[in-house]
Image (cartoon, rainbow, N blue to C red):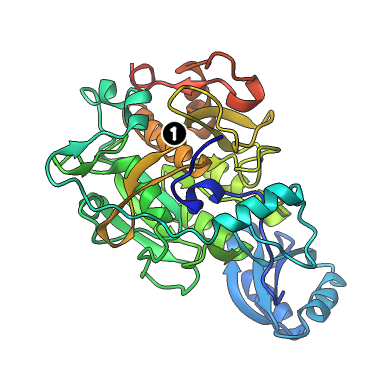
Amino acid sequence: MVRVSHVLGILAASLLSVAAAADERRIVVFTEQTSPARRVQLALESGGTVVREMPLINAVVIEHPTRVGHAASRLLALSEVSRVDPDPEINWLLLADAPGVDFALPSTARMMKDISALRRRPRVAPAPRTGQETPWGITRVQASDAWKTTRGQGVKVVVIDTGIDRTHPDLAANIKGGWNTITKSDNFNDDNGHGSHVSGTIMALDDDKGVIGVAPKVDLYGVKVLNAKGSGTFDDVIAGMLWAVENKMEVANMSLGANQGNQSLADAVEVMRKAGVILIAAAGNSGAAVGYPAAYPGAIAVAASDNKDKLASFSSRGPAVAVIAPGVAVKSAFKAGGYSTLSGTSMATPHVAGLTALYVATHKGATPQQARTALAAASSKLPGVPDEGQGAGLPSAAKLVR
């Protein structure tokens, strides 16, 4: 059994997502020929309130406290509307029951075990008093072997998550900007800790204190799509993905997931791919099929290994898995300037995002397909781990920048 120090690490990027009590939103997708102004007009005429426009996927998001289904039905009757997608608010990080939502659940015994873990409090450790710690995963992907060539300088990496601790001593110097899709503001500070932990693995500074990340000189951007509890609507998450496109990010880390997607989420992945944004996504922690958005062909899905090069018991698996990376007992930054040790495919994913940044730094303009191919070529199979659990294997930074 894997001993996990913090429940967020076990369940982050969980495939078992849950709906909020009120299902008040829909994503309305129009034909390409329908102008943005016409989309808004039709949405308003249906009786809904437009809460977000998403022109890159020809959509608007409508909301109504009691009759959003009625508004959606009226819109579906129009020739200018291609479809209406569900837009529940779900928890993308934690396992919980969701009455009335058709999401597959694990066995009762496993579910109760995971739910009981929710009662545990995260253990947040202070920074080491002296010196700098190199977490085991950074060593395992041979990050330091690439640092003579590049440390990722100039590469734009976005973390689409719970935000980033903007004053954290291991992160602040490299944070270049971001957005909050929930409040539609530039306050993307992390009130959960998950996004800061992910960010530290990607790029914690080489400053003789705290920890160090895979690519310590990247330009870091934070897009907050989840609240303090890890919840957000599908449109909150999709808006973060589209922000990455609009702001010309090169690498995107998504250490989150659901066990079923919708077509709008798939469309957002495809928009990212076509724009050249390399999407690195957590495979999930169900021990079963890969979740979403990781399962979409345009994403690079990452499974989790432990420090003995074994597949983590919780790691999702299947043909969608591209590579595997360290994801058990990973120490990194946390909110409020702290540090924490977490486990999950959420923790494996930023190792690969950092590696991808090192690759992009030495191969400017690399496409998502080129990055996928390069990661596979730089990987070695872990003995005894089935292909569906590791894909091409564990990537090496040294090989990537060679």
| Count of number-bearing discs | 1
Tell me, yes or no, if residue 65 can be seen here: yes
Judged left or right of residue 297, residue 174 is: left
Q: What residue type is labelled 1?
A: Val
- For the C terminus, give its image quadrant: top left
Task: Report the residue at 23% width, 61% height from top.
Answer: 167
On the image, which quarter does residue 36 sit in? Answer: bottom right
> Is residue 325 depicted above or below 157 in this figure?
above
Q: Residue at x 24, y 26 (%)?
A: 147
- Name the quadrant of the N terminus: top right
The residue nearer to you, when weighing 347 against 82, is 347
Q: Is residue 92 visible?
A: no
Rendering coords of residue 94 (x, y %): 58, 57
Query: Which residue does the image show at 20% across and 23% down from the upper left?
Result: 148
Task: Give the labeled residue for mark 1.
Answer: 352
Residue 106 percent across, percent down from the top left: 74, 48
Q: In this view, does 369 lie above or below 98?
A: above
**Looking at the picture, how far across and down is residue 371, in whole percent?**
48, 28
